[in-house]
Amino acid sequence: MEASSGPSALDETDRRILRVLQADGRVTNAELAKRCNLSPAACFDRVRRLRERGVIAGYAALLDPAKVDRALLIFVEVLLDRTTADVFDAFASAVRVSPEILECHMVAGGFDYLIKARVRDMDAYRAFLGDILVRMPGVRETRTYAVLEEIKHTVVLPV
């Protein structure tokens, strides 16, 4: 490997492997090796090391949300009533078990959390908001943003 700036640094061959795998996670090792100008054995070893180091966190099938009844994408700002460790922990625990919530991020600024969720439609969102979200521990206020058009959506990281 090339000289690195730490144990998690990636050389250009690692980056090439990661770019190919992000584009096609089902590529065979033989095809991956061919696209990256490596022998199959060397390619297999590099992918194994990338998995062991946690650079490759897993593999998944990407679904079309509309075809699985999750067409409406929403973002929700959440403001908590108190910003204490116990409220943060209780809120985070409640978020983790809600399947509608795809992402939840604690943020700095005018609110505490930003949630990304997918639901069937606006009726389903109203039910989610009233039955689940506002009943989560510590929730004082929410602001909802329904997405009208997705301009860009990707899970591919620039490497």
Image (cartoon, rainbow, N blue to C red):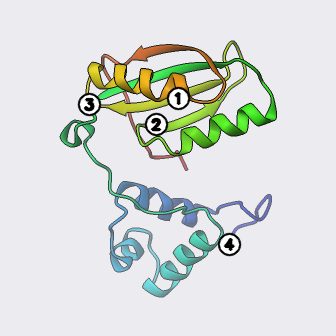
Q: Position of residue 127 (x, y in %)?
A: 35, 24
Q: What element carries label 4?
A: loop
Residue 110's place in the image compared with 6, above or below, is above
The numbered mark, 3 or 2, whose residue comes first in the sequence reads: 2
What is the secondary structure assignment of the residue under circle 1? strand
Q: Is any atom of residue 151 visible in this view? A: no
Q: Which residue is drawn at 55% across and 44% down?
A: 96
Q: Quadrant of residue 15?
A: bottom right
Point out residue 38 in the picture as x, y percentages from the top left corner: 47, 78
With 126 as the anchor, is 112 left or right in this view?
right
Q: Give the CA separation, mark 3 to mark 1.
A: 16 Å
Instruction: Please tell me which residue is depicted at 40% across the width and 23% down the height of the picture.
Output: 74
User: Which amino acid is tagged 2?
Assistant: Ile
| Discs 4/1, front | 1
- Dot 4 or dot 2: first in sequence order is 4
The amino acid type, in three-letter code, at marker 1 is Ile
Residue under label 1: 115
Identify the residue position indicated by label 4 in the image: 1
Measured from the top left, where is residue 95 in percent x and y? 55, 38
